[in-house]
Amino acid sequence: MISKLTEGNSILEEENNFTTGSSTSPWLKKVMNHGPRPRPPGCRSTPWICRKGLHPSSARMRCCRNQCVDVSSDVSNCGFCGIRCRFARQCCHGFCVDTNCNRFHCGRCGNRCPRKVRCVYGMCGYAQPFPPLPFP
């Protein structure tokens, strides 16, 4: 690598040779001498580590593609490893649900609409007329 520095009328040329290690940073020497770092083992060899740890009690942690994931709420691994939810669906308790029109999961998982109230656009009772007032 050749670098040129200009100061006024004089031009200084400097040649760095990375193979001999002259004029290189300590970090670059360390990286060049050691090669790539080994990858962490993940959970493939020990899948039980996903069930241990500081996860919420409602989480169902599983080892999917060498990573610990919650299969009860992950849209890429819904219910089991590799089950993907389609567009505009969420993973609620391990099932792919359309939260725009589901009475039991309206707008988000676990948001239940009252009885006889529809879920439209993820809102309970959207654009629904008010019930008639009782006459005295």
Image (cartoon, helix red, strand yellow):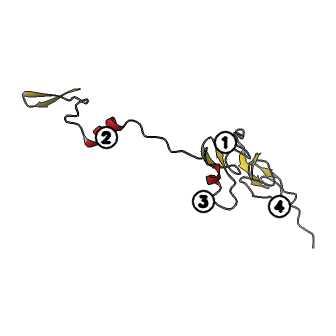
Horizontally, residue 131 falls left or right of residue 91, namely right
Q: How many neighbours does mark 1 have within 10 angstroms: few (below 14), some (14-19), or many (20 or more)?
A: some
- Of tags 1 and 3, which is closer to the observer? 3
Q: For the C terminus, which image quadrant?
A: bottom right
Location of mark 2 (residue): 30
In the displayed structure, 129 sits above or below 26; it is below
Residue 41 appears left or right of 76: left
Q: Nearer the viewer, residue 15 or 115?
A: 15
Q: Give amino acid for label 3.
A: Gly
Nearer to us of marks 1 and 4 is 1
Q: Residues within 10 Å of mark 4 (few under 14, many from 20)?
A: few
Question: Which residue is the site of mark 1?
Answer: 76
Which residue shows up at 35% across the image and 38% down it?
Answer: 34
User: Which of the numbered marks, if any, corresponds to residue 53?
Assistant: 3
Tell me where residue 50 appears, x and y as whole percent. 63, 53
Amino acid type at image mark 1: Ser
Q: Which of these two is toward me, 41 or 117? A: 41
> From mark 1 to mark 3, how far is it between C-alphas?
22 Å
Q: 53 or 87, which lies in front?
A: 53
Residue occupying the point 83% across, 60% down: 130
- Which residue in the rendered view is the most extreme toward the right? 136
Q: CA distance from mark 3 to mark 4?
A: 37 Å
Marking on residue 114:
4
Q: Is residue 62 above or below residue 29?
A: below
Query: What is the three-letter code of the residue carrying label 2?
Result: Lys
Counting residues from the start of the chain, the first of labels 1 and 2 encountered is 2
Kind of residue indicated by mark 4: Pro
Q: Is residue 96 left or right of residue 17?
A: right
